[in-house]
Image (cartoon, helix red, strand yellow):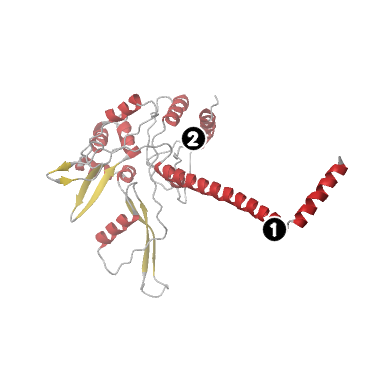
């Protein structure tokens, strides 16, 4: 067996030496063939990845439906400008098309607030609308009425003004900008020649940093003031409400805190969730930590949580992860 192999190896080596040109051409053909396969595969993989990225940019298995553009008196409006789709249409999509697992209606309501010689646009969108709708069922009196009034097709400006007086709700219905740091002067024994203010803005989805900066420049109206950004804007779209996740939260909430309603809301803080949402991965924040809505000390020098609430949260989150992972 070994002798036969060695004999074949000697014959092959001899043939290669005698036919150098044929051997070189054969090797060149093999290299070209392999290179062609590699290039073709790479092009196919790259094209597939680009298409997947474009689809992921819209969201995971997400299809967006807008009402037809409105046309009146010869003028054609923008697509989606006329709100002619209803919640009944969303339900009809789910029941009428077997390939659609869930429909999340998105309604944006806009109202103009006027104060002296200034006016600011306010809107209620996405989970914020669901937040006020469900919360109005648990609240009572004028506050509940105001919550219902601001989520309608035409929000009541008076109700918006009253809700705006409550800091937590004010941050849910509009972009807010608050000075968080003030600096001035260069020495303790000299009048300040320069001053700087850090203004922290929490921007509602659907608005851009450019819009906010233009509004600040218009409100301040002082050419001596220079407004510059400290970071790069990375916009993100809201995550649709997840039916399975919501059901799991409701189930465990009933176990730990019977009678407590589960209300979706938009966080007024900033997280890294937008990076996941922007590649098509819905992202949600949920802790199960009980706190006082009127006593928020996050990021403060006296930040704190209730000990009993912290212990309950740990056990609650443990069971929630097990439930979402298919455990019991």
> How far from the left and from the top, in percent, is residue 300?
45, 50
> How far from the left and from the top, in percent, is residue 15?
77, 53
Can the viewer see residue 273?
no
Q: In which quadrant is the N terminus drawn?
A: top right
Looking at the rendered structure, the secondary structure element under dot 2 is helix
Upstream in sequence: badge 1 or badge 2: 1
State the separation of the CA atoms marked 1 and 2: 82 Å
Farthest residue to the right: give it.
Answer: 3
Q: Residues within 10 Å of mark 1 (few under 14, many from 20)?
A: few
Q: Is residue 42 above or below residue 145?
A: below
Farthest residue to the left: give it.
Answer: 73
Residue 25 position by quadrant = bottom right
At x 24%, y 51%, the residue is 120
> How far from the left and from the top, in percent, is residue 50?
46, 47
Looking at the rendered structure, the secondary structure element under dot 1 is helix
At x 26%, y 46%, the residue is 122
Closer to the eye: label 1 or 2? 1
Can the viewer see residue 93?
yes
Residue under numbered circle 1: 21
199 or 45: which is nearer to us?
45
Q: Is residue 298 above or below residue 187?
A: above
Q: Residues within 10 Å of mark 2 (few under 14, many from 20)?
A: few
The answer to the question of whether label 1 and label 2 lie on touching residues, with beta carbons closer than 8 A, is no
Q: Is residue 232 above or below residue 284?
A: below
Residue under numbered circle 2: 309
Question: Is residue 121 toward the left or the right of residue 243 in the image?
Answer: left
């Amino acid at each position: 067996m070994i002798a036969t192999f060695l004999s074949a190896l000697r014959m092959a080596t001899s043939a290669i030496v005698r036919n150098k040109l044929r051997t070189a051409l054969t090797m060149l053909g093999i290299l070209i063939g392999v290179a062609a396969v590699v290039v073709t595969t790479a092009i196919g993989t790259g094209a597939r990845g680009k298409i997947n990225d474009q689809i992921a940019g819209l969201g995971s298995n997400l299809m967006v439906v807008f009402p037809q553009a409105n046309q009146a008196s010869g003028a054609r409006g923008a697509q989606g400008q006329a709100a002619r789709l209803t919640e009944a249409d969303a339900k009809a999509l789910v029941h009428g098309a077997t390939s659609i697992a869930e429909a999340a209606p998105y309604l944006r309501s806009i109202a103009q607030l006027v104060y002296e010689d200034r006016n600011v646009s306010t809107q209620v969108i996405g989970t914020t609308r669901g937040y006020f709708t469900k919360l109005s069922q648990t609240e009572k009196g004028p506050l509940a009425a105001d919550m219902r009034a601001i989520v309608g097709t035409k929000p009541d400006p008076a109700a918006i003004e009253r809700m705006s007086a409550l800091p937590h709700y004010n941050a849910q219905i509009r972009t807010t900008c608050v000075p968080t740091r003030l600096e001035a002067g260069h020495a303790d024994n000299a009048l300040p020649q320069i001053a700087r203010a850090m203004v922290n803005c929490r921007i509602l989805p659907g608005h851009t940093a450019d819009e906010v900066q233009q509004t600040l420049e218009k409100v301040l109206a002082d050419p001596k003031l220079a407004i510059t950004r400290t970071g790069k804007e990375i916009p993100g779209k809201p995550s649709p409400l997840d039916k399975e996740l919501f059901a799991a939260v409701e189930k465990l909430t009933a176990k730990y805190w019977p009678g407590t309603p589960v209300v979706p809301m938009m966080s007024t803080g900033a997280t890294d969730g937008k990076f996941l949402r922007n590649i098509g991965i819905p992202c949600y924040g949920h802790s199960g930590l009980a706190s006082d809505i009127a006593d928020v000390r996050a990021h403060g020098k006296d930040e704190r949580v209730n000990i009993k609430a912290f212990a309950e949260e740990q056990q609650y989150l443990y069971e929630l992860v097990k439930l979402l992972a298919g455990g019991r």
